Amino acid sequence: SAVISQKPSRDICQRGTSLTIQCQVDSQVTMMFWYRQQPGQSLTLIATANQGSEATYESGFVIDKFPISRPNLTFSTLTVSNMSPEDSSIYLCSVGDRVGRETQYFGPGTRLLVL
Amino acid sequence: KQEVTQIPAALSVPEGENLVLNCSFTDSAIYNLQWFRQDPGKGLTSLLLIQSSQREQTSGRLNASLDKSSGRSTLYIAASQPGDSATYLCAPYSGGGADGLTFGKGTHLIIQP
């Protein structure tokens, strides 16, 4: 199984600012994803981070608000831009190989509070 | 669009009981289904993965079944322990452009010592 770390583990930010979350995996993986878990809600997929190309965003999420980078097969970043209190959530990175055939693994998450 | 419902939303029982958590999904054309647990303030831990061709999977005291045609899965926890207290999430994988998982809202489980 993959070991995934995220930085920061938590942060408190002011509205209007931006925060970049890092996701590091201990081995090369094909697929990397970013999810959001709003308070009291389940997980919602934000986007698939594609190595060497633009991320693929789900309906309701846009690149200007959630820019994503994936420079290699072990690392990705998610930026939450121009934050508002509605962005207060847990943001989780997940990885998998040949998703649909194998287990998908999750990082510990980043708890974000926007004031 | 896949929708996932988990029942019950919350459950509190004394330790030692056998439990059944239910998951239903609207699109039965799935490749597989995963059960996760989430501890407060933590990420997700994968418990079991059932492929669409399988009927059940077992890991220790956990047994997950899948009835793909009816859009249902159950997670059976035998001889529950206080350490089993967590939120349990069901996530069928339907494929699609982004290849991510669709999650239910989970069952919040408390096992009383």
Image (spheres, grey):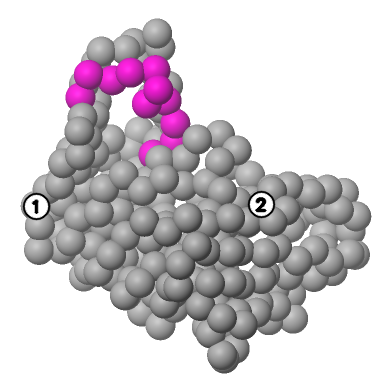
Q: How crowded is mark 2: few (under 14 residues within 10 Å), some or many (20 or more)?
A: many
Q: Residue B60: x, y in percent?
A: 20, 33
Q: Residue B25: x, y in percent?
A: 29, 56
Quarter-of-image position of residue A92: bottom right
B80 over B73 or under it: above or below: above
Could you tell me the amino acid type at mark 2? Answer: Thr
Could you tell me the amino acid type at mark 1? Answer: Arg
Residue picked out by circle 1 = B55
Is A62 left or right of B70, judged from the image as shown?
A: right
Marks 1 and 2, how far apart in space?
A: 35 Å
Residues shaded magenta = B78-88
Tell me the residue at 56%/90% (across/down): A52
Tell me the residue at 83%/66% (across/down): A18
Tell me the residue at 65%/79% (across/down): A69
Chain at tag 1: B
| B9 drawn magenta | no
Q: Residue A54: x, y in percent?
A: 59, 88
Q: Can residue B100 be seen at all in this image of the molecule? A: no
Quarter-of-image position of residue B83: top left
Residue picked out by circle 2 = A110
